[in-house]
Amino acid sequence: MIKTKDLTLAYLDAESKLATENPVLSRVNVQLDAGEFVLVCGPTGSGKSSLLKALNGLVPHFTGGILTGELWLDGKDMTGSQPHDLAELVGYVNQQPEGSFVADTVIDEIAYGPEQLGIDPALIASRIDEVAERLGITNLLELPLASLSGGQQQRVAIAAALASGQKILLLDEPTSALDIVSAREVVALLRDLAHQHGMTVLLAEHRIGRVVGEVDSVLVVHGDGSVTKSAPSAAFNDDRFAPPIIELGLAMGWNPLPVAMKDAAALWAASPADFAPIVRDSKPGDVLLRATDLAVRYGATNAVLPTSLEIHSGEIVALMGENGSGKTSLLWALQGLGDVSGGVVEIKNHQSPSTWSDTKKLNNLARLAAINMVPQRAADLLFLNTVSEELAESDRFASVQEGTTGALLSAIAGRLNPSAHPRDLSAGQQLALVLAVQLAKGAQVLLLDEPTRGLDYSSKRKLAKQLQILREQGRGVLVASHDIEFVAMVADRVLVMQAGQIAESAPLEIALGCGAQLASQLAEISNAPQLITISQLVMR
């Protein structure tokens, strides 16, 4: 179904306008069959999205650059084809599908693509019914897109990508913003599309643990231009993107490495190891931020019911829960810029610790000095023409030594091309840049909304280290995340939201232990009620 021959992609240098010396893709030769379910993985910024876009014509016709080599799809030479030439064959769902919706309702969104291709209206209607039934969204067809949960929006985006009878489906980070239940449903759906309906499905994903046990093969985009294909059990010899199940297998010396949870659990049961308990170096300090009866309403919808919470100095708190439970609305309300229909949020004055300020009443400069937020759409905070300009402006605005923001960025994601336009970075690199910019401001309280979208495991560990430094400095951090393994690295306690209110507050060890709703992979494999991270492993 897909065959590439010496596929090579190089972008142009911003200054010289010549192809860069290090191509994003270099002489890629892969072959994928009809009905094959494929994971595309690799380090942050390695070229995964570029590879997908080369398969649907967006590279180079939309993104620019120079693409050479051959591309064969469904037995036809499609080298050099424009995106509209491939639209009936290849469906594509980008990293933020909600940002690419063009209609108001589900049915109109699904119909849009076939209409642009000139398909007969009667055939469009039958295809809408077919894909809606296949994806389990028939009951959603008349609903506004804005009323759907993240998981439902993802299903609609997939339906829209298949409504013209496509045989190939490409998805970029399809589970990154989904809770664990929704993610499992989407992965099961994709597996069914491949194995039961004969589609070739490629998904680029950083949360590899969610999908590695379900796919047929793995394409690794290494970051040096090369791309290799292998079986899932043989793909992960690079700790930049090895999921916890693989890390555990390597540490235990299992060969072959298990990729399915049940296989890892059986190996563990046959020869278990021990885990050292978590040791807290320090206890949380005084309260830095407190919310009292905080509520958020959008029209007739109660996004956040009256909620009270406290964030202490020297602690990292995870905010978890299903899509649509109110996490993002709560973060914006705490930050002082979101809608608030009741209650108050107060932050301690760092210059006068005995006084408190209402975050809603702070001016912009005072608010940024007290509380910062990294939103889900991190790129919204990038507005200059080059990475170097963003870094310099961050240092100037935060009144810190020149190079401070750049050092933070390097610590999280390594060095980025300073002349690159921020919009040309990968989603993970954009996030790392925004994280560095916000960290440089040195606010007492940092709010993070899904801070690991687009980050490989190595970058997650580096981000965890930066947050732990903030903890040691006495800052307070609140992290809203579906990324259970990242939460396991950093959090001291977990707040779980359900239907607009905090339904549970528990220490990390309990919240992510075996049997819990949010159990980590390692806890499930080892059946350990308080297991957290691979760093606690003690061999017998």
Image (cartoon, grey):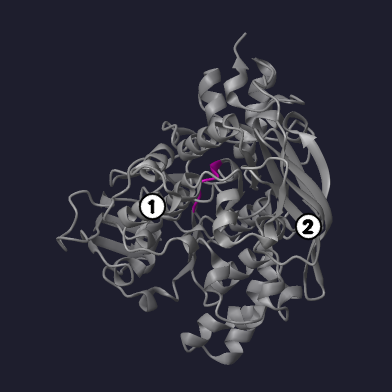
**205 inside magenta stretch:** yes
Residue located 53% across and 28% down the image: 247
Q: Over which residues does the magenta segment extend? A: 204-208
**367 inside magenta stretch:** no
Q: Is residue 239 left or right of residue 370?
A: left
Viewer-proximal residue among 120 and 196: 120
* Quadrant of the snapshot with the C terminus: top right
> Looking at the image, do the residues carrying marks 1 and 2 touch, with CB atoms under 8 Å apart?
no
> Where is mark 1, residue-wise?
396
Residue located 46% across and 38% down the image: 241
Residue neighbourhood size for the residue with mark 1, other residues' Cα within 10 Å, grouped as few (<14), some (14–19), many (≥20): few
Q: Earlier in the sequence, mark 1 or mark 2?
A: 2
> Where is mark 2, residue-wise?
344
Q: Amino acid at mark 2?
A: Val
Viewer-proximal residue among 385 and 135: 385
* Quadrant of the snapshot with the N terminus: bottom left
Identify the image quadrant of residue 406: top left
Residue located 32% across and 63% down the image: 385
Q: What label sits on residue 316 in the rendered view? A: none
What separation in Å lies between label 1 and label 2 (alpha carbons)? 32 Å
Viewer-proximal residue among 162 and 226: 226
Where in the figure is residue 375, as x and y percent of width and height? Answer: 57, 57
Under tag 2, what secondary structure? strand
Q: Amino acid at mark 1?
A: Arg
Under tag 1, what secondary structure? helix
Residue located 67% across and 33% down the image: 262
Q: For the stretch drawn in magenta, what is the main secondary structure?
A: loop
Where in the figure is residue 403, as x and y percent of width and height? Answer: 34, 43
Residue 106 visible in this rendered orientation of the protein: yes
Identify the image quadrant of residue 336: bottom right
